[in-house]
Image: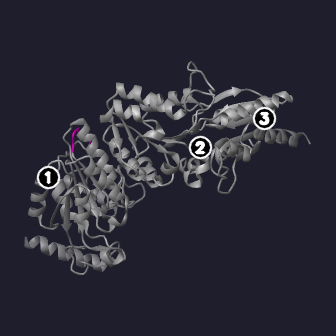
Amino acid sequence: MGTIPCRTAITDALVEEGKKNKDLFVVTSDARGSVTLEKYADLLPDQFVEVGIAEQNAVGIGAGLALAGKKVFVCGPACFYSARALEQLKVDVAYSEASVKVIGVSGGVSYGALGSTHHSLHDIAAIRTFPGLNVYLPSDRHQSAWLTRHLVDSDESAYVRVGRNAVPDIYTEHDLFEAGKASILRRGRDIALIAAGETVYHALHAAELLEKEGFQASVIDMYCIKPIDEETILEAARNNSCMLTVEEHSIFGGLGAAVSEIISQKHPTLLKILGIPDENAIHARPLEVFSHYQMDGPGIYKNAKSLILSLKQ
Amino acid sequence: MSSVDILVSLYFEVMNIDPENPDMEGRDRFILSKGHSVESYHAVLSKRGFFSEKVLDTYGDYNSILAGHPTRKVPGIEVNSGALGHGLSVGVGMALAAKRSGSGCRAFILMGDGEHGEGSIMEAAAAAGHYHLDNLVAIIDRNGLQISGKTEDVMRIENLEAKYLACGWSVRTCNGHDMDELKKSFNHAPFEKGKPSLLIAHTVKGKGVSFMEDKASWHHKVPSAEELDLALDELDLKLNKK
């Protein structure tokens, strides 16, 4: 397993960048513990704004700071920022074109046992429709740290969703990333597995299981869901017999839908969308939720294999 | 029309702005949180020199910069608004940025009274008090009416003064159509050092046109050609008398 959660990699990067740039501001809503912002608040109090339990206010204040020239990261639980503060994201950030970066932590089913109030399984679908608001789901600590540094330097508006727990490393600290470019982790021919965030590790596991049976899977880390890497998706569609997306999100409107929007119009390819079906997700530990909905390695393997075999019948 | 005198006071007598350079460093910021009063806002900005008066005739047209609510496409407008209950939070961000940078600029936020049905305003009011933003001035256009009728009949919002005092503000009231009172009030801001200021401006909806005054039905009604002529005649008469 990796050593630190993505949220900690992000806040470590914010501390380093904040020391260099006094215009870097972090806003939070009584979430400095869950985001791991204690160090930032202690070291850079003049660049830290606590608003209490008030996510709408946090995003509105963030937009005001940004419109006054600050580089703003608003950080807190993804479930609240992507729902209660949705109108502030739509109006104050996207419509007013305020360069605010919202870091949604403990996203998806990180708070698995706490119930649907604390799940964020709608956020990609809702937020990627807001003009100019980009959506990222980094898959490990190294990619999270790089993305944070990239966003500090970028004038874009963005929503970044990461999980609560430490996840296995996908990359090393030496790996290089390109903004808007997905990472191709394996190249196969039978099926392309496209994942984002915490499902990337499970997709890699599934590819190993498939390989044992002679199936070659491509694995793509689509950390940038918006703007999405269309070129890599089309290349995967051309080079593989079928595709499978897996996301810690509703099967409606998320990664699968974004991939489908491209291939259905430009290179029709058989596609399976794995995620949470149209129901309130079960209450359990995150990995148990993944397993229940076949979003873990064995579940992805099973769905991928049956998709490949369906083409051979 | 209830807010036009407040806007004139701010843009012609109070705020540090430059129509020739709308993005001037250190300028005061204004947010029309009650974005539906945009027609008055456009007229005042144009008169102040932010854009030509001819542009006013394109209001609502295809590709016009003037929409039915404020947008940053219009020179001088700082933030897009129209969804109620947002402006004060954004203003707190702007005032906080100025405080932390020591830039000395102020933030003025004009809100409606009916708008106070939106609870997010109280989140922003708490933050403004908590951070001692004495460079922030909020104004409530207290015309007493909203779309469905009297504010107190639709949903009680009083006691506004007590609510803001509880959040650590300093509060004053004035006649929102008396230019001297408005100017004096703004010039006294901050009303108390270390506290954000609230000016409750008592106003009349439809001010200046007898058949529109104090009538909720004129909240967003479009006058007929005949009513428009009548209204313009009344306003001309008043202006000529002065």
Q: Is residue B198 above or below residue A232?
A: below
- Residue type at mark 3 is Ile
Measure the C-alpha gap from mark 3 to mark 2.
28 Å
Name which residue lies at 17% across and 66% down: B176
- Residue type at mark 2 is Ser
Q: Which residue is mark 3?
A: A191
Name which residue lies at 71% across and 34% down: A203
Q: Quadrant of residue B44?
A: bottom left
Q: Which x, y percent locates residue A125?
A: 59, 50
Closer to the camera, A282 or B45?
A282
Q: Is residue A201 magenta?
A: no
- Label 2 Cα neighbours within 10 Å, binned few <14 / some 14-19 / many ≥20: many
Q: Which x, y percent locates residue B132?
A: 22, 47
Q: Which residues are magenta?
A: B23-27
- Label 1 Cα neighbours within 10 Å, binned few <14 / some 14-19 / many ≥20: few
- Most common SS among magenta residues: loop
Residue A110 badge = 2
